[in-house]
Image (cartoon, helix red, strand yellow):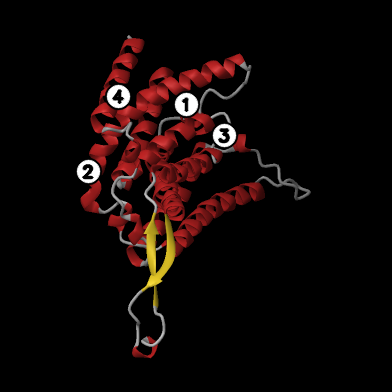
Amino acid sequence: MQWLLLCAATVLAGLIIWRTGAFRAWSVIGPSRHWRVHTRPLAILMIAAITIWFAVQAGFVAYQQKMHEDETGQAKFDPESLTTNDWAFLSVVPGTVGIILLLAGHLGGKTGAPRELGFAPSQFIPGLLGGILGLLVVLPIMLWWMMFLEWFYNVIHLQHPNEHDLLRVIKSAPPGAAKVAIIIGATVVAPVFEEFVFRGHLQTLLVRLFTERRATAPGFPLSPELASSEAMTSVLEVNRSPSRYWMAIVLSSIVFALIHPPWMAPAIFVLSLCLGYLYQRTGLLWATIVLHSLFNIYNTVVFLHQMS
């Protein structure tokens, strides 16, 4: 029955790909709103969000090391000693702080309006529909890819964990608020923060880098004093080649895969390619957030079902 459902889902995904023209090279370009976004503030905000996300985690680990010092002052902190409450903190708080910083920067700064990055409130419904449609395509692709990876790992005799660290913690955690917080962190907080950083910021910046350049051309003088000289003005030239958009998607996907455990990186890379394409195709950050969240929910539900 599982194979039958997977084959049916694969056929449905193929029909959606054909009907939406996703196989066409130019489909990756989609709506171009990124040119309105201010790149320097966007880059600064991305770096600040990643820094505070890392700093909260590093501060928590330093606190745990201090708590586990022995009489000689040597830290004997072991990640295996983290409690369910500790994992709940790590899965929710750093990402939430990063999201708050990003939202505050966009709503109160000069990085560009939320509509340009695709997370305005009015864009939620189209993004929700796009994310659900994207899941129907991405899920069978990922299932086939993960089965191939498992076969390949067996061939090369690569030993790896059977589940993500958070899933392992969820499996062993007793029922309660901490377990719920870990699930929320994995299915909501992580997708939102990661999509903001890797699609909304990093991929947007790379698209601008690879597709745009400033050039000078003759123009009208800005003041009467310049009327006697050859006035020049700066113009923006855009190279809308699909290969340049794919360069941005691939590079951001490599970075995204590298922050995950090595044995998960190939699967995460393919998932990120799909998310990057969806973002470029729709221009909606809501769509990638919904797809990423639904994919994590699916994996969590399947994992919990297998436990029962």
Q: Nearer the viewer, residue 259 or 59?
A: 259
Among the two numbered marks 3 and 1 on one chain, the one whose residue lies closer to the N terminus: 1
Q: CA distance from mark 2 to mark 1?
A: 35 Å
**Residue drawn 41% across and 26% down?**
142
Q: Which mark is residue 235?
A: none
**Within 10 Å of the Cα at label 1, are there few (<14), some (14-19), or many (20+) other Cα atoms?**
some
Q: Residue furthest bottom?
A: 225
Residue 183 visible at all: no
Q: Which mark is residue 13?
A: 4
Q: Nearer the viewer, residue 5 or 274?
A: 274
Which residue does the numbered mark 3 point to in the structure image? 261
**Within 10 Å of the Cα at label 2, are there few (<14), some (14-19), or many (20+) other Cα atoms?**
few
Q: Position of residue 81 (x, y in %)?
A: 61, 36
The reply to whether callout 4 and callout 2 are in contact (CB within 8 Å) is: no
Q: Position of residue 289 (x, y in %)?
A: 34, 42
Q: Position of residue 203 (x, y in %)?
A: 43, 48
Q: CA distance from mark 3 to mark 4?
A: 28 Å
Question: Height in image: 97 above or below 138?
Answer: below
Which residue does the numbered mark 1 point to in the structure image? 171
Residue 136 visible at all: yes
Among the two numbered marks 2 and 1 on one chain, the one whose residue lies closer to the N terminus: 2
Q: Nearer the viewer, residue 144 or 56?
A: 144
Depth check, mark 3 against mark 4: the one in front is 4
Q: CA distance from mark 4 to mark 2?
A: 19 Å
**Residue drawn 29% across and 18% down?**
11
Callout 4 amino acid: Ala
Among the two numbered marks 1 and 4 on one chain, the one whose residue lies closer to the N terminus: 4
Among the two numbered marks 3 and 4 on one chain, the one whose residue lies closer to the N terminus: 4
